Image (spheres, rainbow, N blue to C red):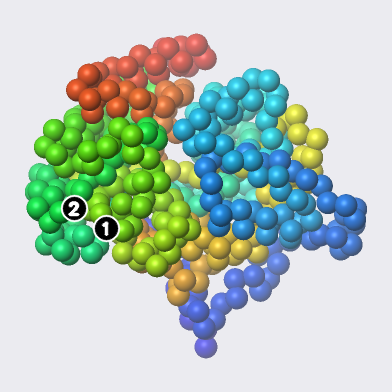
Amino acid sequence: MNKSFRATLLSSFIVGLVFVTACGGNSNESAGSNGSAPATSGAESGAPASKVTISHAVGGDSPSRDVWMKAIGEAVGVDLDIQVLPLEQMEQIYKVKAGTDDLPDLISYHPGARTRDDLQAPDKLVDLSDMPIVQNIMDDIKPYYVEPDGKVYGVPGQALKFGGIAYNKKAFTEAGVSIPQSLDELFAASEKLKAAGKIPLYLSAKDSWTLQIPGLAAFSYDQLHSPGILDKINQNEATFKDAANFIEAFDTMKKMVDQGYVNSDYLSATYTNGLQAISEGKAGMYPVLTSAFSTILDTTPDLINDVGFFPWPVEGDKTVTVWPPMIYGIPQSSKNADAVKKYIEYFASSEGQKIYFDTLPAAGVPAYKGVELDESKLLDPVKEMIEVTRTAKQFATVDFSVVANMGAFGQTVQEILMGQKTGADLAAELSDILAKNAKAKGAPGF
């Protein structure tokens, strides 16, 4: 008899998952079982013989992503023109295209303040509030997809991700270290890893967005230790200068550089270099989002289970930082909005989610209710990631949660690593940027 079980993630952001074992549970037995209408194509849906081509701009190259996207397109009878943008320039390109009404038919962008401010969502994007799949978004992340006007201009287009540190299990074993539970233990582990001939902490400043992750992850400890700090920042009653863990994370990175615990080429190293180093065991640790696991699965699948995950290590109770999935949205300028809606609806259906997670078994945690995952197909780093979330308090990344967009700040972190600025300087800069943008949009208190 088929066996199933529900794993409830003990957090304020994740409600639960359904897993089924390999010997049972066909996850698409009932069409549209998560509440959305099943998509059909060809003669069944009355669609014309010629396929509509929808353009979709994505950040970075990913062969497996192309596979599931094209499979979703095939299921609903559309062709996808996938346009790959450099990750480091994606935000700027999107903002420029939004300003000139030149966005692709299907967009994938950061939720929350980024969508609201960068893409001017109410003026530029189609209202998706009436789509049935909106009701299936996990309750605790749904606020990131509902704008202040009560409307939804984008729905989750990926799995939930977490920010923390990827580590190589073999490198840890060779160096005789265990997962650090504090910053002191992080330095102690780094010394042992260095003695074992490993790069203790890999940094990839060439792709400067990766440098933001330690601080964004550490801010969750500020929320844990100073309840209400985010609300106070959003009401102009506190600033990032009050976020001690956020500041300490960047100063810690600088200390790691000074003590020779990072790769010597950290300023020119890329995200791709980092993933290679951590998967091959040349590096012991690498601060990343858990979406990195899917990329490792693309490039070195035989090494994926050598990689694990742990939260940014602050002493005491642990927190994990959640990255709500990038949105799927439709620009008002699109001439193929109906076809794109069918694509999005199918992606969020049970059938579409099965295609997604079967193709990307390292994707993460579903953003939609009632999605069934085959337990036997979960990879070791994903299992470890889920196990971590059962005991750690979770908060959404602050850059999605603030009242106004505070922008990317990886370049300033580069300056910190080179000794030109400090974590406190960064906190002051971000506080000024947030206050300026909040005031410009008329946010209360600014």
The quadrant in which residue 228 appears is: top left
Left or right: where does residue 220 sit relative to residue 225? right
Q: From what the image shows, is residue 30 above or below residue 42?
A: below
> Who comes first in sequence, dot 1 or dot 2?
2
Front in this rendered view, residue 257 or 264: 264
Q: Tell me the crowding category of disc 1: few under 14, some 14 to 19, or many 20 or more residues within 10 angstroms, Cα based.
A: many
Q: Which residue is mark 2?
A: 198
Q: Tell me the crowding category of disc 2: few under 14, some 14 to 19, or many 20 or more residues within 10 angstroms, Cα based.
A: many
Residue at 25% from the left image edge and 54% from the top image edge: 282
Place of residue 376 in the rendered image (x, y in percent of width and height, measured from the top left):
45, 75
Amino acid type at mark 2: Lys
For the residues labelled 1 and 2, say whether their Cβ atoms are less than 8 Å apart. yes
Q: Does dot 2 land on a helix, a strand or a loop?
A: loop
Left or right: where does residue 83 sit relative to residue 109? right
Q: Does dot 1 land on a helix, a strand or a loop?
A: loop
Residue at 30% from the left image edge and 32% from the top image edge: 267
Place of residue 288 in the rendered image (x, y in percent of width and height, measured from the top left):
35, 45
Q: From what the image shows, is residue 384 above or below residue 395?
A: below
Residue at 45% from the left image edge and 16% from the top image edge: 438
The quadrant in which residue 149 appears is: top right
Q: Residue furthest bottom?
A: 1
Front in this rendered view, residue 430 or 443: 430
In this view of the protein, can residue 339 be seen by the observer?
yes
In this view of the protein, can residue 34 be seen by the observer?
no
The quadrant in which residue 238 appears is: top left
Q: Which residue is mark 1?
A: 281
Residue at 15% from the left image edge and 63% from the top image edge: 174
Amino acid type at mark 1: Gly
Front in this rendered view, residue 7 or 69: 69
Place of residue 59 in the rendered image (x, y in percent of width and height, measured from the top left):
54, 40
